[in-house]
Image (cartoon, rainbow, N blue to C red):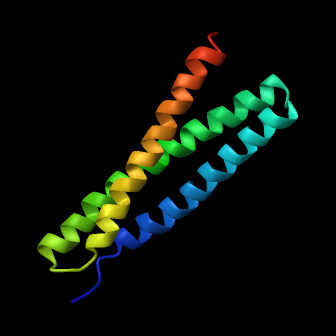
Amino acid sequence: MKDFWLPKVFSKTILFLLFATGLALFLYLLGNYQDFIDVSQRFLVTVLEYTSLLSAIFCLYFFIAKLYEIIFRKGRGYISVILSLIGCAVTAFIYLGTKFLFAFTYPY
């Protein structure tokens, strides 16, 4: 039986987006410590918002594709299903945190 290719594409995309989210979060925290200008901080928060949202969406798609593979193709990967749900929750939490940060820090 041929392998289902969609979870592999999603997993590589999720990995890239998680690294981009981590980098944006690191740069934002570093910018707070070193007093970056307001425009740079806003840009980093916007990048963090979009990468975390995309990562959460792709984690959800990965979860659905992996469930399809497990149920209909009798595949394995129960741990990856659990990790995708954890990743989706973490990135959704980061997304909600950036929305909260935007609402109270940059009200305009």
| x 55%, y 39%: residue | 50
Q: 93 left or right of 42?
A: left
Residue furthest top in the image = 108
Q: 75 left or right of 36?
A: left
Residue furthest bottom in the image = 1
Q: Quadrant of residue 29?
A: top right
Where does the image place residue 70, in percent across and percent down from the top left?
Answer: 19, 73
99 relative to 51, above or below? above
- Nearest to the observer: residue 81 or residue 62: 81
Where does the image place residue 97, in percent across and percent down from the top left?
Answer: 52, 32
Q: 13 left or right of 24?
A: left
| x 12%, y 73%: residue | 72
| x 66%, y 16%: residue | 106
76 relative to 84, above or below? below
| x 48%, y 46%: residue | 54
Q: Quadrant of residue 87?
A: bottom left
Where does the image place residue 77, in percent across and percent down from the top left?
Answer: 28, 75
**Label tally:** 0
- Nearest to the observer: residue 54 or residue 32: 32
Image quarter in which the C terminus is found: top right
Residue furthest left in the image = 72
Residue furthest front in the image = 33
Image quarter in which the N terminus is found: bottom left
95 relative to 74, above or below? above
Where does the image place residue 102, in percent across and percent down from the top left?
Answer: 59, 22
Q: 23 left or right of 85?
A: right
58 relative to 10, above or below? above
Q: Quadrant of residue 93?
A: top left
- Nearest to the observer: residue 86 or residue 75: 86
